[in-house]
Image: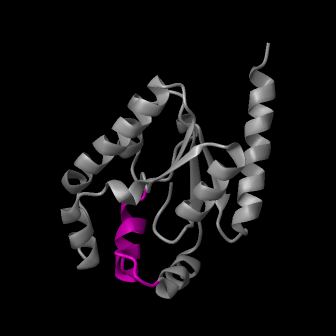
Amino acid sequence: MGVAGTGKSTVGAALAHALGLSFVEGDAYHPASNLQRMAAGIPLTDADRSPWLEALAGRLRAAEQASAGLVMACSALKRTYREVLRTAAAGITFIYLHGDRELLAGRLAQRRDHFMPPSLLDSQLAALEPPARDEDAWGYDVSLPPREIVAAVLKRAAARTRAELP
């Protein structure tokens, strides 16, 4: 989770590969109207995001019902958005990717053929509610290379798994 330019898709896909799990690109679940709004430089509202979040929650719910692990890239900018996802998959852990505005803006400026224009970064940063301590979110600064973030997540996940063993 995180704002545009944090590398959610890159880190998520690499993490899914390392874990042997399916990867879901959350952006693929946006209705066409959301993609059109963002492409036009119009920030999404909570109402715009609601059907998208429900679609993602449905995907998480299906994976949980099938006892299948899943890695999903999703901005999940607000606590209320994360709660929608958490109700679908009680065991969810959020990997919060964050970085300074200049780094993120630079990354967005280099993107080609992406619906999300760099002009929307500030609206995402304004909407962002960093996860609170009670949200089971692991934060990583995206000034680190994606491979290092993935390695740190895998190490932390392994330590948690060991701690949960009887």
How many numbered markers are drawn?
0
Q: Position of residue 5 (x, y in %)?
A: 51, 72
Q: Residue at x 38, y 60 (%)?
A: 27
Q: Is residue 7 visible?
A: yes
- Colour scheme of the rendered structure: one colour
* Quarter of the image where one finds residue 159: top right
162 lies left or right of 19: right
Nearer to us in this view, 2 or 67: 67
Q: Is residue 80 above or below residue 96?
A: above
Q: Residue at x 76, y 42 (%)?
A: 156
Q: Is residue 118 magenta?
A: yes
Q: Residue at x 57, y 53 (%)?
A: 96
Q: Is residue 69 above or below residue 119?
A: above
Q: Position of residue 90 (x, y in %)?
A: 48, 27
Q: Is residue 30 magenta?
A: no
Q: Residue at x 23, y 79 (%)?
A: 40
The range drawn in magenta is 112-128
Q: Position of residue 147 (x, y in %)?
A: 74, 63
Q: Is residue 86 visible?
A: no
Q: Give the quarter of the figure containing the C terminus.
A: top right
Q: Is residue 8 above or below residue 103?
A: above
150 lies left or right of 86: right
Nearer to us in this view, 99 or 163: 163
Q: Is residue 145 above or below residue 86?
A: below
